[in-house]
Amino acid sequence: MLRALLAAALALGLALPAGAAECRRIAHEGRPYTICDVYPARDALRLFHTDAEGRPYGHFGTLDAALAAQGLRLGAAMNAGMYHEDRSPVGLYVEEGRQTMHLVTSPGPGNFGLLPNGVLCLRDGRAEVIETRRFEKAAPACRFATQSGPMLVIDGELHPRFLPDSTSRYVRNGVGTSADGDRLVMAISEVPVTFHEFGRLFRDVLRLPQALYLDGNVSRLHAPSLGRSDFGRPMGPILGVVEPAG
């Protein structure tokens, strides 16, 4: 799999500079965030979970080392959804067209089950956050996909169950996509924030019509352009840009 990725990324690298995904720090309503702009038609964006032996990568450094052995490196990346104790994904997971976990459409406990939740679907040159029941009906052919929840923004509106006066605060991370699928933004808060505050970042500042929450207990960012690579509890799926090394 990595050999095929190497060929594709090197071909892409002939036309693109290394470090194409751009990360920067911003503030909204006095709260700091770090965001990374990714353009799927330009950047080699994909999902990672396990290595060739079926072992979860767990950490950015482990994944970066695996890519380095193939002449690649990990660009902007973050944890990409909730997972069980064995680090298997909670909901739908697709990698290189192979589905390893099924779509979950029923409500349930925790943030994942706070419907509506959604799916991040990556296709060639396109990235889309799609509400789960829409996804079920449309059944798009995703090269990569990860399900998480809740949705943060749906058609330009905040999730209906978010409370402006909530006191539940965590360091949170998520992704949003443009209507045409040409732009994806990874975002992580640098201080604990509520769902309502985090959703407003995507709606009011990033102006993305669809956005999906990824986690709040295990929120990590890898941003080489900022000299940052968070370490901590092992992760499940990882969303990342692959770049030519050097």
Image (spheres, rainbow, N blue to C red):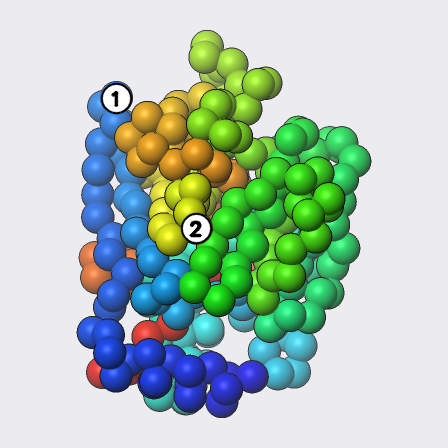
Residue at the spot x=71%, y=65% of the render?
99
Disc 2 to disc 1: CB gap under 8 Å? no
* Rendered location of residue 162, percent (x, y): 53, 19
Residue at the spot x=36%, y=51% of the render?
183
Q: Residue furthest right?
A: 106
Which is more toward the observer, 23 or 160?
160
What is the secondary structure assignment of the residue under circle 1? Answer: loop
How dense is the environment of label 1, judged by Cα within 10 Å: few (below 14), some, or many (20 and up)? few
From the viewer's perspective, is the residue at label 2 or at label 1 nearer?
Answer: 2
For the residue marked with disc 2, what is the amino acid? Gly
* Rendered location of residue 104, percent (x, y): 75, 45
Q: Which residue is mark 2?
A: 181
* Number of marks present in the image shown: 2
Specify whether 25 is left or right of 172. Answer: left
* Rendered location of residue 209, percent (x, y): 44, 34
Residue at the spot x=60%, y=61% of the render?
142
Q: CA distance from mark 2 to mark 1?
A: 27 Å
How dense is the environment of label 2, judged by Cα within 10 Å: few (below 14), some, or many (20 and up)? some
Q: Does 204 sit above or below residue 129?
A: above
Residue at the spot x=24%, y=78% of the render?
15
Picture quarter with the N terminus: bottom right
Specify whether 130 is left or right of 203. Answer: right
